[in-house]
């Protein structure tokens, strides 16, 4: 039987693969792949929502190499979205290069979970907007997923997640 930590690590690892799949969709399929790209992002978000709780339920209480890379997997998905949008011709290559350089410099300089969360927000917002424009049902699905995630994590979301993010941003601004 597969342990919950193994399943959590599998979900984390899958996100790295999904990031490359998003890039491949942009390169091979272009803007016509907006529906599979949107569904891929939904799968990535779902695996992200599940891996942490699964890892915490494992009775062995171990930390693994892949488990320590959860945030990197999340950032890879954000980059995958950016590259998909660029290769599909939906986003300026210059904007993507500038964003990637600024995001990489910020992540390297601040090494902060909150900075990584902020770095992911822009590509996700661009994907929601683009999906909303090209495939409205799927754009709505992304928004519905976010709302469902907030409701499912209530009251932890307003009591912990939001304050953690805001405190992290404040500390980054004070540097």
Image (cartoon, helix red, strand yellow):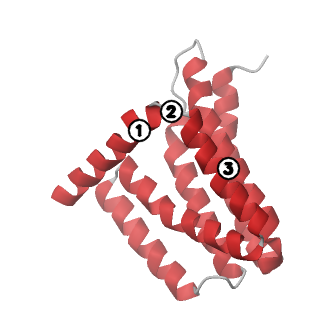
Q: Earlier in the sequence, mark 3 or mark 2?
A: 3
- Mark 2 surroundings within 10 Å by alpha-carbon count, few (fewer than 14), some (14 through 19), many (20 or more): few
In this rendering, the label closer to the viewer, 1 or 3: 1
Alpha carbons under labels 1 and 3: distance apart: 23 Å
Location of residue 4 by image quarter: top right
Q: Secondary structure at mark 1?
A: helix
Residue lying at the far left of the rendered structure = 174
Give the labeled residue for mark 2. Answer: 154
Q: Secondary structure at mark 3?
A: helix
Residue in the picture at 31% in, 49% down: 166
Quadrant, the C terminus: bottom left
Q: Residue at x 70, y 46 (%)?
A: 14
**Residue 147: x %, y % from top left:** 59, 47
User: Where does label 1 land, which residue?
Assistant: 158
The mark found on residue 44 in the picture is 3
Instruction: Determine the secondary structure under disc 2.
Output: loop
């Amino acid at each position: 039987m597969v342990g919950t930590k193994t399943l959590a690590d599998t979900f984390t690892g899958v996100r790295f693969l999904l990031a490359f799949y998003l890039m491949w969709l942009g390169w091979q399929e272009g803007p016509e792949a907006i529906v599979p790209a949107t569904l891929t992002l939904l799968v990535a978000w779902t695996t992200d929502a599940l891996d942490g709780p699964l890892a915490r339920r494992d009775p062995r209480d171990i930390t693994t190499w892949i488990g320590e890379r959860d945030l990197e997997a999340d950032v890879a998905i954000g980059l995958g979205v950016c590259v998909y949008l660029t290769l599909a011709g939906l986003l300026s290559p210059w904007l993507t290069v500038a964003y990637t350089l600024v995001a990489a410099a910020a992540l390297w300089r601040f090494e902060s979970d909150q900075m990584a969360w902020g770095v992911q927000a822009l590509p996700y917002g661009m994907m929601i907007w683009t999906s909303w424009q090209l495939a409205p049902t799927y754009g709505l699905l992304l928004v519905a997923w976010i709302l469902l995630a907030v409701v499912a994590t209530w009251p932890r979301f307003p009591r912990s997640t939001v304050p953690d993010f805001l405190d992290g941003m404040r500390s980054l601004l004070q540097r």
